[in-house]
Amino acid sequence: MIVLGIETSCDETGVALHCSERGLLAQALHSQIAMHQRYGGVVPELASRDHIRRVLPLARQVLDEAGLGLSDLNAVAYTAGPGLAGALLVGAGVGASLAWALGVPAIGVHHLEGHLLSPLLAVDPPAFPFVALLVSGGHTQLMDVQGVGRYELLGDTLDDAAGEAFDKSAKLLGLGYPGGPAIAKLAESGRPGRYELPRPMLRSGDLDFSFSGLKTAVLTLVRRELDEGAGSGNPETRDPRQVRADIAAEVQAAITDVLVAKSVKALQHAGRETLVVAGGVSANRRLRERLAAEQERRRFRVHFPELALCSDNGAMIAFAGALRLAALKERGELAGLKPPEGF
Ligand code: KG4
Ligand code: ZN
């Protein structure tokens, strides 16, 4: 079974082909980061228009690369949500109409399910059941995963997502978009601990998160150390570049400390020995290192998607679509996915 996957939920146009026997056949990605950078964030209207321009040429590209034609497709999967409405409409419109024209099933995939299953594309994939930590620009969730489509929400963010906390803190530090990679880079020359930021909800007793207070604390710190305090004290420690780097390192430490502690707690709560981390923030090196250290100490195994699959991409949508297709086929429910007669 060959599935074409289309991702257009935000600022990446991703298209890929997945084969149930041979795995990923081809994938192509166009990032809009350069286009949105001057605005300091994603401009939804520009995003939708760019997806329209890119999606069909990228689909043609992956088919050519795999040496396949449209008639070889057994299904088309597209990101159905969540995401920017106009951007999603592009992928859904193209995906559903392509499927209808070819007479194959159209599979609307939940964006987070795509992220959640992406570590299973690895050479040494994790086995079910596992706990998943989903950390992206819009979500921070802990999930008990028993199988494809069998997910139980263990914890969620009450306000900002982890990626959003990175992005908003980066903005306060005068760094570009997207903020996560910018903070991570600056943090390399910084010292966590020089400034003290809160670890929100660390001792809340549940598996929920809250990051909006962190943003306020960063704002206060930036005002004190960069806006008002610049110029006083030891010239070396007052160097604005060093101050920025030290704040970035503490922001990264605060966010990752909470993510690590809650993930460990979720593993204990669900009685699982495998942790899967996915979503844009799973690319963060400090998060990876901290979890790798914890797995040694606490005897669980942690799996990440390969770096190229951490942020949004078509491969995870094609793969999630393929797994959904296989599950439906097994249950004899495939007919339910066909576009209705006369649609
Ligand atoms: O999954 P994703 O590409 O898009 C959404 O579904 O939201 O995640 C994007 C988020 C952004 O907030 C970005 O700043 C963050 O992931 N991110 C990172 C890193 N790379 C991307 N955060 C921390 N460290 C990184 N290396
Ligand atoms: Zn995403």
Image (cartoon, rainbow, N blue to C red):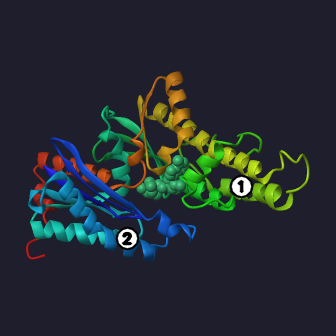
Label 1 sits on residue: 218
Element under disc 2: helix
Q: Residue at x 84, y 45 (%)?
A: 236
Q: Is residue 228 visible?
A: yes
Q: Quadrant of ligand 2?
A: bottom left
Give the residue type that dot 1 points to: Val
* Residue 296 against residue 278 in the figure, above or below: above
- Return the residue nearer the eye: 50 or 3: 50
Q: Position of residue 241 (x, y in %)?
A: 74, 52
Residue 34 % position (x, y) = 49, 65
Outermost residue on the right side: it is 233
Q: Is residue 200 visible?
A: no
Q: Give me the residue at 13% from left, 76% from top.
A: 343
The answer to whether mark 1 and mark 2 are in CB contact below 8 A is no
Q: Provide the residue designation for mark 2.
A: 87
Q: Amino acid at mark 2?
A: Ala
The one nearer the camera, 160 or 122, is: 122
| Mark before the other along the chain sequence, 1 or 2 | 2
**Is 166 situated above or below 295?**
below
- Near-viewer residue (60 or 221): 60
x and y, in percent, of residue 268 in the image: 48, 31
Residue at x 33% of width, y 33% of height: 126
Give how far across and how far down residue 279 sits, in percent. 44, 49
Specify few, some or many for label 2: CA neighbours under 10 Å numbering under 14, 14-19, or 20 or more. Answer: many
Question: Of helix, strand and loop, which one carries label 1?
Answer: helix
Look at the picture and state if 95 lies above or below 233: below
